Amino acid sequence: MNTAVSEKCILLEKNRSAVKDKFAFEEGLMGVIAGFIYTSEQAEADADKLTECRKILRKQTGIFSDMRATAELVILSKMALSEDPEKYLEDIKEVNKKICGAKLSKGTNAILAAVIICDMGMQAECDEAVGKAKELMKRMNKDHPFLTGADDISPVVLMALSYKETDKLLADLEEGYSYIKKTYKPGISSDAVQGVCEILAMSYGDMKAKCDKVMRIYKALKDKKLDFSTDAKFSVLAALAETDAAPETLAADIADASEFLKTMKGFDKSRMDDKERFMYATLVVADVYGRDSSVAGSTVINNTISIITAKRNAAIMNLVMNIAPTLLGACADTAEPEEKQEEKSGE
């Protein structure tokens, strides 16, 4: 096993565990993301500093603030790693306000977009980036209305922060999307294909060559029985498109990382399914091979929140389906027969 990959996996689990010990009631997958934010900086999680940052966050935001919802651990981790946590939070709040004011997005998606802009040090160019992102979303909605939605905000903001013109970004996005769909017919969802191409379109270079690299990695993974299937988790593979390593080498490292992570408490079968573990293993490998972790990390944060939201919605539906018959039965038991009601009305 690649030593750098195994060391990164060990540090990730150590950081995840440190965060989870201090924030026991947080969603487990967000603990993984917080752990990776530290891991990508080659740092060890400081639980006490995270707690201090939470005090700052709660002092400066209202109880119903979206910053204190699903993405809270992301913000806290970023604050804790910054030189000035209070200034970092103020920047996030200011950029988030502009994103919401421009009606680009709102809620958690807007906050994640604000984090991306601040992490790239582009606060001063925020208005221009938001305007560009809004135009990209508008035109993507026109071209692919059923594929484009709130989950696209983070990658679209990353696209907007690139130096490529809007027309070129959209042309590359469409070229990649059509090329993968027609050439490979990969059997994955159209939404997943668009997600990959959004990331590939951010950088310069031949779009088809980048698509070829992603699909070769995908095939090498399938050969090892590691299948991302139709899930949007497939999009994280785009972070590996411009590495120099051969697809077979990358697939082997991802397979090794996934198996190694499975032996660890936070990643075993009782806590996450195989496809989720593949996604985090891919994130580790992308970080090891020196790609810009802001792209891969942002993609996985976005996907993780989508996973959490889907699980919560499924739990709510399950609860409703199980409780509704009981409630209806109780209502039927307590309802008075019509004859009784008529007798009372005649008294």
Image (cartoon, rainbow, N blue to C red):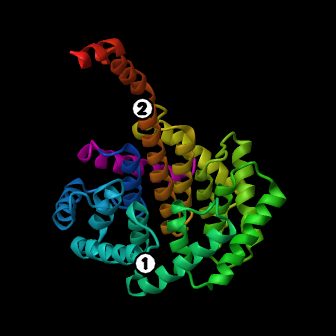
Q: Tell me where residue 52 appears, x and y as whole percent.
A: 17, 60
Mark identifier at residue 268: none
Question: Is 252 situated above or below 68?
Answer: above
> For this view, does 207 lie left or right of residue 96?
right
- Magenta extent: 1-25
Q: Which residue lies furthest to the right in this view?
A: 183
> Is residue 243 visible in the rendered structure shown here?
no
Secondary structure found at label 1 = loop
Secondary structure found at label 2 = helix
> For this view, does 179 lie left or right of residue 24?
right
- By secondary structure, the bulk of the magenta-drawn segment is best described as helix
> Does 13 lie within the magenta span?
yes
The residue drawn where x is 66% and y is 50% is: 251
Q: Residue type at mark 2: give it.
A: Val
Q: Tell me where residue 241 appears, x and y as whole percent.
A: 66, 65
Question: Is 224 situated above or below 335?
Answer: below
Q: Name the residue under label 2.
A: 320
- Do residues under tags 2 and 1 come within 8 Å of each other at their CB atoms? no
Where residue 238 sits, quadrant-wise, is bottom right
Mark identifier at residue 102: 1
